[in-house]
Image (spheres, rainbow, N blue to C red):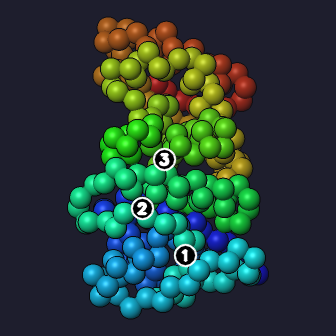
Amino acid sequence: MFIPRIAITTGEPAGIGPDICLQISQLAWPCQLVFIADTALLKRRAKQLNLNIEFKSFEPNTPAAQHTPGLIYVYPVLLPEKEVCGQLNTNNSSYVIETLTIAAQLCKDNVCSALVTAPVQKSIINDAGIAFTGHTEFFADYCASYPVMMLQTQQLRVALATTHIPLSKVSETITEALLIKVINIINDDLKSKFSIKKPKIAVCGLNPHAGESGHLGHEELQTIIPALNTCRETGIHITGPLP
């Protein structure tokens, strides 16, 4: 039986990320969890949380096994300076980036099937002189691919045309070519990754009331509607722009 491995980055060392990771390690999972972190950091936090956890170093060449509650496999990454909970430290920003890089490479090498990221503090990473917009953009750059962010619940999937840019730049960033590209990625991935044979995609307008026929903005008439028409011509089932 195939048992997937999930790489988990523990996020900002002074934040809640390590706590979350330790808490989920207490549960049973039908996969193997691999935590990308400083082992000493996790041990300190486990002691603070009064959690009895056994730590083992992750060995990529060993067979994957379903997660055992209370047992953590760690891919060790050295934290430059001991963390102080609630106090951000630019000297530890490189550690956060290193954990993300390792997790991404584990997935690219097919050692892990997927990755999960605990929260990071973007500002402290940038304060350290490391350009960082967000997880989505980081992994896209690392894999040399175009990012599309999707948020999912059991009832709803929401994908974004733009991510992590100032509101003042959204209108100029949304182009006909961008929308066509994003919609095609969404349509293809709904088929290949979610097994939806005939995806139905709804596109929201940018302006109030979807522009009110041009009275509240022209983006719908000039950009969004032409993009949707192009997508329909290729057989994509799409509606919008919706107010």
Residue picked out by circle 2: 80
Q: Alpha-carbon neighbours of circle 3 within 10 Å: few (<14), some, or many (≥20)?
A: some
Residue picked out by circle 3: 135
Tell me what residue is drawn at x 59 percent, y 41 percent.
140
- Mark 2 vs mark 1: in front: 2
Q: Is residue 225 above or below residue 67?
A: above
Query: Mark 2 belongs to which amino acid?
Result: Pro
Tell me what residue is drawn at x 48 percent, y 89 percent.
54
Q: Earlier in the sequence, mark 1 or mark 3?
A: 1
Residue picked out by circle 1: 74
Q: Is residue 120 left or right of residue 175?
A: left
Q: Is residue 169 above or below residue 114?
A: above
Whole-percent x and y of residue 15?
A: 31, 62
Identify the element where label 3 is drawn. helix
Tell me what residue is drawn at x 38 percent, y 91 percent.
52
Query: Mark 3 belongs to which amino acid?
Result: His
Identify the element where label 1 is drawn. strand
